[in-house]
Image: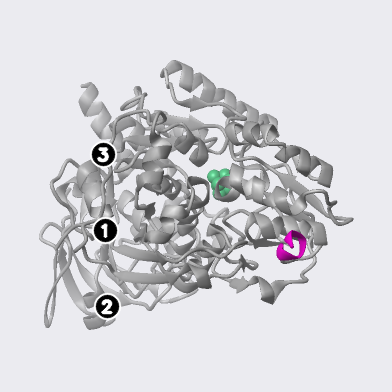
Amino acid sequence: MGMTFAEKALARSAGMKEANSGEIVIARPDITLSHDNSAAIIGLFHKMGGESLFDSQRTVIVLDHASPAPTTQHAENHRQIREFVHEHEIEHFYDVGRGICHQVLVEEGLALPGELVLGADSHTLHAGVMGAFGTGIGRSEMASVWALGELWLRVPESIKIELYGHLRPGVTTKDLALHVIGQLGADGALYQSVEWHGEALHSISIDQRSTLPNMMAEAGAKNSIVIPDEVTLQYLKNRAKRSFEPLLPDPDCGYAQVLRIETDRVEPMLACPHTVDNVKPLSAVRGTQIQQAFLGTCTNGRLEDLAAAAAVLDGRKLAPGVRMIVIPASSTVYLQALQAGILETFVTAGALIQSPGCGPCMGNHLGIPAVGEITISTANRNFRGRMGTKESEIYLASPQVVAASALAGEICDPAEFLS
Amino acid sequence: MSTDLISGRVWKYGDDINTDVIFPGKYTYTVSDPRLMPQHALEDLDPSFASQVEPGDVIVAGRNFGCGSSREQAVTCLKESGVGAILAVSFARIYYRNCLNAALPALISSEAYAVLDKGDRVSIDLESGSLQYEDGQISFKPIPASVRMIFDAGGLIEYTRSRLSAEGA
Ligand code: SF4
């Protein structure tokens, strides 16, 4: 029997010819990724007796979680990280304002097909959009990897998702990801590798595809990849920092589960409070009052996301009493949106634009809800208290639905503004 | 000391045993000394566990063991109780990693859950991947030597430290 992507990628990273699911291998990452939590990792690294990094060229640090620093404590962490970066000559360091680590890794051509990315963040699966094996690890694990350049990993079983047809207009990969999470459940892909296959992908851009592996963390997956194709290779041309060799699953490999999805049948979906697998179609939650709309995050803060929301907002004003916060996922996205006039549309509509980073996604700053308020957001998590306030609710949706809801003051179908 | 051989009695539980019942959240900020954690291990699930568990005993459970928060105390309290291994049909991802990094063998086995009962005497050989019980034998994927080295060092942090000092020497 052939090998899955996960089996091939982890065999490669362990210097082995083959690996089988369930087996534990000692993997050597091509890239390690950490963010503001690097300050804690530095502490652990020193505690372990770490003096030099296994490879300063492969250590990537992006300051994004509280960026620019909202408190002295955060600022001190940032300073400590900058000193460490300087001392260890870390080339791939991106200071505040460059963007969200997962997006930056892709834009900088550091997430490459077939490679292993270990990140001290649960959404490191994101790197799978480029055909890399991306997975999240703990802080002490990262400190150990910095020191030794290796970590044990259990080779996961795999789930294959085959996409057919075309997404209907107004339906996005966010809806598709939520649809899949609704089917799988919060632990439906527990410790597994989720592979996205199918003809439908070829007409889906990198911006849109990124949402798919990103969201699979919410089904418990260990990693997730979009099978690399022409679109991937085109994106990496003149961008990839190193040469690479894509790894594709063998046609006869074994899957724990295969899901076939007719994408034409997917409708706009929302994740309702307080779990991501509490998924409902838009028609079931229309009319729910909202006080805050948040467009951004590694899930949906790219240029196409901003453009889709701007198309809904164009020439209109936010409903009275609604705040809309827009955070481009990176400085590149910010600049492109600026040049395309998209930011003007937001400002004219009454929305606020903040500097690239995670913003209020995990409750650090730039839009913490008040007690009892309801936020509609393009993020990937809606756990109780995620945005900093336990007694508030978060609905997750596509950029279009978030924009339409900001105009209506209640959860609303964007079709009402686009016809 | 090698931890390759483990023997003791079985404590058996069901599916979705979450970190809140393994180590209640109310103690996470009040009990910080690892040696005091065993008193509260599995307190809300099985009040007899803490007083009766013996070194080498193993926990056998169903699906998704250790789901919920990523608190490391939920591993520490069992490790400090002397639990020799946990065998489950499946583990929550972070819990599984926390176990192995804390030198507590987490073994994936549906068979163990199907055939073993509370109180059974078992002995486990991590290197060969086998478990003996009164009525027979179960095999599981052996734990590779590289991970058993982490166990022998007492956990990932100690292991990293000892590798670095060996390299420096
Ligand atoms: S945007 Fe949100 S989900 Fe993405 S990395 Fe930042 S905090 Fe995590």
The chain letter for the residue carrying disc 1 is: B
The chain letter for the residue carrying disc 2 is: B
Do marks 1 and 2 share a chain?
yes
- Distance, label 2 to label 3, CA atoms, is 42 Å
The residue sitting at 65% across, 67% down in the picture is A273
The residue sitting at 24% across, 57% down in the picture is A4
Q: Which mark is residue B105?
A: 1
Q: Residue A179 at x, y = what percent? A: 52, 68
Q: Which mark is residue A245?
A: 3
Of the two numbered discs 1 and 2 in the rendering, the one whose residue sits closer to the viewer: 2
Q: Main secondary structure of the magenta part?
A: helix
* In magenta segment, residue A417: yes
Amino acid type shown at disc 2? Tyr
Q: Residue A214 at x, y = what percent? A: 48, 52
Q: Quadrant of the C terminus of chain B?
A: top left
Q: Which mark is residue B159?
A: none
- Distance, label 1 to label 2, CA atoms, is 16 Å
The residue sitting at 17% across, 53% down in the picture is A19
Amino acid type shown at disc 1? Pro
Q: Observer-nearest residue: B53 or B126? A: B126
Q: Is residue A137 visible?
A: no
**Do the residues bearing badges 2 and 3 touch, measured as CB atoms within 8 Å?**
no
Earlier-in-chain disc, 1 versus 2: 1
On screen, residue A229 versus residue A102, left or right, reads left
- Distance, label 3 to label 1, CA atoms, is 35 Å
Q: Which mark is residue B113?
A: 2
Amino acid type shown at disc 3? Glu
Up the image or down, A406 lies above or below B21; here it is above
Q: Residue A400 at x, y = what percent? A: 67, 57
The residue sitting at 86% across, 57% down in the picture is A319
Label 3 Cα crowd, 10 Å radius (few <14 / some 14-19 / many 20+): few
Label 2 Cα crowd, 10 Å radius (few <14 / some 14-19 / many 20+): many
